[in-house]
């Protein structure tokens, strides 16, 4: 398979995982994703994330009680789904991805990647570490 073909397969796998985790259609544009985040996710949309029990307690509780989320909380849900999707494509398995994201990493001063998702710079660092892994560096 050509590098371009492999990238396309990886992207489709990533988008399929996003669809599973937050009901974001595989063919959604970035603008549509942005608008979805702004309009908010429901507990039904985030059911798969709720079942993983990896969300911060406040978001988990508000979704479970059927309360609406702020834009920043909806953005957090997307960041979690985005990073899980990247990790699942890298590891080839959702449970392996979840396990890796839950374990402390020396690259983050002993903080698990999931805890880095509370900020945009932290999310970028997790994305960069996964990208380094795809380039053959040790995670």
Image: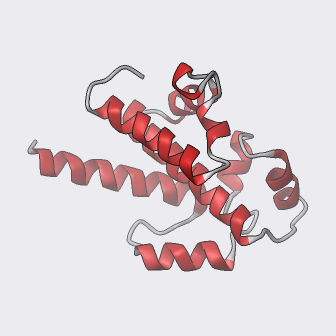
Q: Residue at x 82, y 71 (%)?
A: 68
Q: Percent from the top left, x then y, of residue 92?
A: 40, 33
Count of picture labels: 0
Q: Residue at x 68, y 58 (%)?
A: 46
Q: Residue at x 41, y 31 (%)?
A: 91
Q: Percent from the top left, x then y, of residue 70?
A: 77, 70
Residue 1 relative to residue 108: left or right: left
- Nearer to me, 86 or 109: 109
Residue 85 relative to residue 122: left or right: left
Q: Residue at x 70, y 71 (%)?
A: 71
Residue 96 relative to residue 3: left or right: right
Q: Is residue 129 above or below residue 103?
A: below
Q: How is the image coloured?
A: secondary structure
Q: Quadrant of residue 138?
A: top left
Q: Percent from the top left, x then y, of residue 111?
A: 65, 27
Q: Percent from the top left, x then y, of residue 103?
A: 62, 23
Most distant residue in the right direction: 65
Q: Is residue 57 above or below residue 27?
A: above
- Nearer to me, 24 or 113: 113
In the rendered image, the quadrant that contains the C terminus is top left
Q: Is residue 128 above or below residue 139?
A: below
Most distant residue in the left direction: 2
- Nearer to me, 18 or 58: 58
In the rendered image, the quadrant that contains the N terminus is top left
Residue 69 relative to residue 74: left or right: right
């Amino acid at each position: 398979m050509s590098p371009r073909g492999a990238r396309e397969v990886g992207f489709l796998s990533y988008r399929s995982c996003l669809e599973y985790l937050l009901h974001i259609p595989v063919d959604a544009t970035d603008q549509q994703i942005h608008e979805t985040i702004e309009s908010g996710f429901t507990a039904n949309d985030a059911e798969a994330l709720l079942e993983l029990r990896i969300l911060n307690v406040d978001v988990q509780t508000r979704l479970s009680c059927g309360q609406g989320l702020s834009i920043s909380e909806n953005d957090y849900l997307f960041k979690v789904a985005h990073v899980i999707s990247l990790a699942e494509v890298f590891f080839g398995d959702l449970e392996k991805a979840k396990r890796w994201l839950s374990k402390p990493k020396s690259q983050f001063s002993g903080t698990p990647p999931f805890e880095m998702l509370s900020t945009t710079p932290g999310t970028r660092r997790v994305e960069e570490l996964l990208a380094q892994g795809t380039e053959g560096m040790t995670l």
